[in-house]
Amino acid sequence: MIRNKKTKDEIIRYSLSRRKFLGLTAAGAGAAALATSGFDKLQAYAAEHGQVVKTTIENGEIYSLCEMCVWRCGLVAKVRDGKITKLEGNPNHPHSRGKLCPRGQAGLGVTYDRDRLKWPLIRAGKRGEGKFYKVTWDEALDYVAERMLHIKEKYGPQAMIFSTTHNMLQQQFENLLGAFGSPNYGTQRSLCFNAMITANMLTYGFEEPGRDYNNTSYIIYAGRNMMEAISNSETQDLVEALSKGAKVVVLDPRFSKTAARATEWLPIRPGGDLAFFLAMIHDIIKNNLYDKEFVAAHTFGFDKLKQEVEKYTPEWAEAQCDVPAATIRRIAHEFAVASPRAFAHPNWRTSNFVNSFQTQRAIAVLNAIIGNWDKLGGQCPVFGEGEGVELGRVPQPPYPRTAALRLDGVPWKHPLVPLKLGIFQNIRDAILSGKPYQAHGWFIYRQNPLNSIPERRKTLQAFAKMDFIATIDVIMNDTAYYSDVVLPEATYLERFDPLAVVEGDVYIRQPAIEPLFDSKPGLWIFKELGKRLGLGDFFNYKDEEDYLRAQLKPLPVSLEELKKKGRYAPPKEGDKEKAVGIFHTSTGKIELASTVLERLGHKSVPHWQEPPRPGDNEFYLLTGKVALHTQFFTQNNEYLSDLFPENPVWINSRAAQERGIKNGDKVIVESRVGKV
Ligand SMILES: Nc1nc2c(c(=O)[nH]1)N[C@H]1C(S)=C(S)[C@@H](COP(=O)(O)OP(=O)(O)OC[C@H]3O[C@@H](n4cnc5c(=O)[nH]c(N)nc54)[C@H](O)[C@@H]3O)O[C@H]1N2
Ligand SMILES: Nc1nc2c(c(=O)[nH]1)N[C@H]1C(S)=C(S)[C@@H](COP(=O)(O)OP(=O)(O)OC[C@H]3O[C@@H](n4cnc5c(=O)[nH]c(N)nc54)[C@H](O)[C@@H]3O)O[C@H]1N2
Ligand code: SF4
Ligand SMILES: [Mo]
């Protein structure tokens, strides 16, 4: 270790217990201190440490983008006397439409969190002991580069894993791994909606169809808790559709807030959705309720589908999913009659069960046979992420070629999974087995794999096999806590990021205040690290604004103008339909029977796969988002934690009664992989 020159008093100790700061304040200074703003507390803390909290902009309103979740709504930050006093929704951004959700409004709780990461840190004690040296950026970046180059030299670039969760800097992150020469890329998608994307790619030839909430009269959700797992604009769409009288059916084992607001809630057996949808398809075909003209003209493989679903009667499905056969028949009938002003939502958390992929295929196929494609109130073509405008690029050389296999088995074991999404949890298994080769380093940006990949113990074992782990974050999350180097990124209200293209328009994220403490924008961090890794040519921009100018080069808008308005909307050529209205499958049609699955030796049509069932005295453990938190990011946010401090476990009330468990009791939840 090169850090032994440091003196003892520069060591900072962290603790993993949540809300430590709030606890201390309450006990030490009482209610008066709690009433002061996050900013004042942070400033007092800075003064104690001889730091000045600098701000440049004194007063004004700044257009920027939220980062409290991956929906990235447009926001307006109000700045008074150098402090951000309030965040509001940008009326001109399609994701916010003038409104921020509670998490978005609580964004100041990140920027003005006294516990936020403030300085680069290098581990002082053992991994997971929580002791770090406070160091300079030069020291930290030199150290990261030295360790990464050492791994590259000794084991090859493929021994470094790079992982991140969807973000506006993804292109620079991919640049880093591409230039470094590693094929090992971990994203959150396989913990999130890989199954949905893969199923839609195979059925429609693109990632996710859009939905016309404005004109719909019937929506089926299966495990999409839209009222709590908020996608701001789509949640607004649902509220509107309900108020206009659309029927909303929610399949969820839990009585979620979406179930509570729905027209009809169907408590379904976990993992049973596939049976429900197969039976709907069976019933709609059997009763000739499908759109024959559309099926003949635009789909492929109907006869095979018909043959397969013959056996999936509603009575059969009832035994698999606990929804009564008569209910399935009624819903199938209502849905077909409402079509084409009807859709079954493709859902997001779709990587939970062994049959999730088949479930997603069944949903895609159900939508296709009722002919709701490109019809009012049905499914519709939309711009994919980043589509619609061609931005300029900072010039860079091509990436070095790599012959190494990917540790996640994509595509050599798993040819259907898109390369840019991968299978994150497989990387962990490969670290543990050392096959097909041993990884030695892990570079993590904006992600918390220690919490987000199921079976934390196993992830800790994988960490233990790493010679080196670096994390870039804004808080000391669990993963950072176990890292060797922690780099503090400036929060989203303090930095520029690469431009965002949403529905064919360009949006800017820009600082409302200067970065607090010694935090730095990601664009700066990647450039400085690239330089030290000998990869400077791949980060060929002077500073953040220079990067954005290169992106804007082909467009008739200046950075200054974009900063002022927050958005550039180029004139649209033709309509969206023209841009994305074709099916990019090998038959050019919606594939009810997938030619790709067939070619790879799989059954080509959706079919039943049995999910595991719990044994006696066992339960399914399901998770669901809550409206006031984002994943593992917001537990320390003073506004959100005050409103939602604990995450209780729910159990069916009859099952609870049988076990003598009362509301508010503490229970132990135990499984094969751990106990809480
Ligand atoms: N038990 C359980 N596990 C789950 C889920 C669940 O509901 N329950 N959900 C799954 C799903 S859907 C997903 S998408 C994954 C998510 O998995 P992860 O992405 O690993 O989880 P997050 O908590 O969203 O981690 C994001 C990290 O980004 C950091 N961050 C936020 N803003 C910034 C920034 O501006 N810069 C930097 N550098 N860092 C920032 C946050 O502090 C946080 O630590 O988890 C999956 N795993
Ligand atoms: N407030 C808030 N909003 C968020 C997020 C957040 O962390 N907080 N995260 C964002 C992200 S990354 C994502 S991916 C989306 C996720 O959006 P959703 O997919 O809607 O999220 P979840 O709440 O994980 O799961 C939805 C529901 O599925 C139910 N469920 C579990 N198993 C089954 C099953 O077998 N069948 C059926 N029918 N239902 C089942 C759960 O009870 C839960 O209510 O939310 C996004 N929005
Ligand atoms: S949905 Fe909420 S948290 Fe997510 S980006 Fe929009 S306002 Fe921010
Ligand atoms: Mo997600």
Image (cartoon, rainbow, N blue to C red):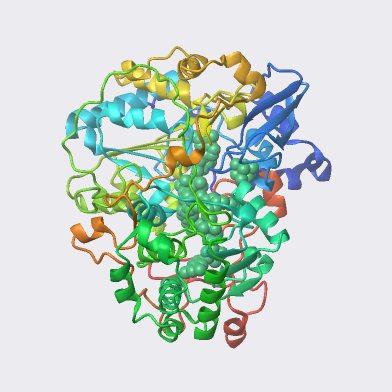
- Residue at point 51% right, 79% down? 328
Vertical side of 488 occupied by 635: above or below: below
Residue 338 point in image, percent of width and height: 58, 67
In this rendered view, identify the residue nearer to me: 92 or 32: 92
Q: Is residue 392 found left or right of 659 in the rendered image?
A: left
Vertical side of 611 occupied by 657: above or below: below
Residue found at the far front of this picture = 293
Classify the position of the N terminus by image quarter: top left
Q: Is residue 36 found left or right of 661 in the rendered image?
A: right
| Number of numbered labels in the structure image | 0
Residue 631 is at least partly visible in this image = no
Residue 354 is at least partly visible in this image = yes
- Residue at point 75% right, 47% down? 26
Residue 102 point in image, percent of width and height: 69, 47
Vertical side of 11 occupied by 304: above or below: below
Specify the quadrant of the image occupied by residue 350: bottom left
Residue 673 point in image, percent of width and height: 39, 66
In this rendered view, identify the residue nearer to me: 531 or 560: 560
Residue 461 point in image, percent of width and height: 33, 53
Residue found at the far right of this picture = 32
Vertical side of 296 occupied by 146: above or below: above
Specify the quadrant of the image occupied by residue 227: bottom right
Q: Ligand 3: give its quadrant.
A: top right
- Residue at point 44% right, 75% down? 288
Specify the quadrant of the image occupied by residue 644: bottom right
